[in-house]
Amino acid sequence: MDELSKLRDKIDNVDNKILELLNERMHYVNEIGIIKQTSGTAIYRPEREKEILDRLKKLNKGMLNHSAIDAIYLEVFAVSRNLEMPEKIAFLGPEGSYTHQVAESRFGAMGNYIPLSCVEAVFHVLDNEEAKYGVVPIENNTEGAVGITLDCLGKFSSLIVAEIYMDIHHSFATLCENLKDIKRIYSHPQGYNQCRKFLEEHMLMDIEFIPTKSTAASAKKAANDPEAASICSHIAAKLYNLPILFEKIEDNLANKTRFLILSNFKNKPGVKNKTSILAKTEDKPGSLVRFLQSFQDESVNITKIESRPVKDKGFQAVFYLDFEGHIDDENVQRVLEKNRGINEIKWLGSYLSAGE
């Protein structure tokens, strides 16, 4: 037997052991699922998953880096959750969108996904209990906050249970083997405009541009057009079996979007927590200053504040705030107590801070 065959045999033996151990893990997962269903405990526990990942990274002595451990075990977690209790996940569609990519990164390829046409539809589906989880964008580091998401957080009852920061990379995908064979480029106008430097460098600006409703739709069209290319997400190219010729073609390689995972349960405190609220202050001079001062007095660090107009109240505003800590922390409770009866506050969720 040659050396290659010997190594392959060793890999086969390792795979056999991995399969056996994964099945053993799923046996325990199934038992936990039965207990959770009996007690009404949430299946998705981000703080528990982070605890496992942190422990494994500390134990790791091999060739796997932290990103590889995340990739492998996030899929294991997703399979485990589906075994415990299959749940539906609503997201801002269509399939192949960046929101879909984020959803799949947490709920796995086996997830039961519901693509929806707008952010508000995701909140409606969650309120109607037609899905257990929802995934929506809330802000981009170059384009700012997603106003409709902030508005829906005020209108609906869903809670933020997790946040995910994702690098937004555009790919150039096509059935053509050579750039000179491309006659058309499909893309959402925003995606096209974010890749102008690439298009100019490769002398593609004079090629016909056909706008689409989404980058996912552009991938679908290019997959059926042998003389076309698409500017799309990696997941959209994969979904429509469209070969990627160039990855990461956007002008701004630091393009990043923050997404929220929504559901109907309260997280337990973790190692590093973030809390989100909506607040409407008194209509008096200095009321916002006094409100913000109450956070400083209790050493609660505000990490984001965004104002939104109250649509039916003239020029009044409501403020969206992110701050460090869990809603059950003593200093956070003191802040809320100081503002009770003075300012209207809606708690939107406490969750693990993902960091940027």
Image: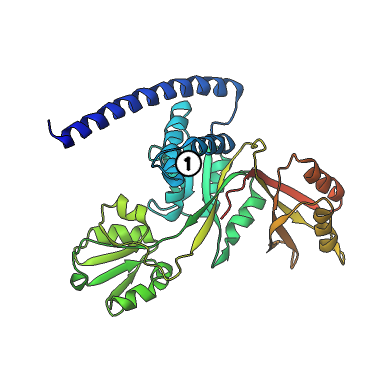
Compared with 83, 177 (above or below) is below
Task: Looking at the picture, tell me which residue is in the foreground, 149 or 306.
Answer: 306
In the picture shown, does residue 275 fall above or below 290? above
In percent of width and height, residue 268 lies at 66, 35
Q: Going 31% across and 73% down the picture, which residue do you hit? A: 209
Q: Is residue 86 visible?
A: no
Location of residue 315 by image quarter: bottom right
Location of the N terminus by quadrant is top left
* Left or right of residue 77: residue 162: right
Judged left or right of residue 102, residue 10 is: left
Which one is nearer the viewer's eye here, 290 or 115?
Answer: 290
Q: Which residue is mark 1?
A: 89
Where is 37 relative to 205, above or below?
Answer: above
Residue type, label 1: Ile
Q: Quadrant of the C terminus?
A: bottom right
List the single residue furthest toward the left. 1
Q: Position of residue 278 (x, y in %)?
A: 71, 53
At 27% across and 65% down in the image, what residue appears? 229
How dense is the environment of label 1, judged by Cα within 10 Å: few (below 14), some, or many (20 and up)? many
Q: Position of residue 144 (x, y in %)?
A: 58, 65
**Which residue of the protein is positioned furthest toward the bottom in this rendering?**
206
Q: How is the image coloured?
A: rainbow
Q: Residue at x 87, y 67 (%)?
A: 285
Viewer-nearest residue: 67 or 76: 67
Closer to us: 288 or 315: 288
Looking at the image, which residue is at 45% across and 42% down? Answer: 70
Q: Based on the displayed image, in which of its 4 quarters is residue 262 positioned?
A: top right
In the shown orientation, is residue 15 left or right of residue 29? left
Circle 1 SS class? strand
Residue 191 screen position, x and y as percent = 41, 67
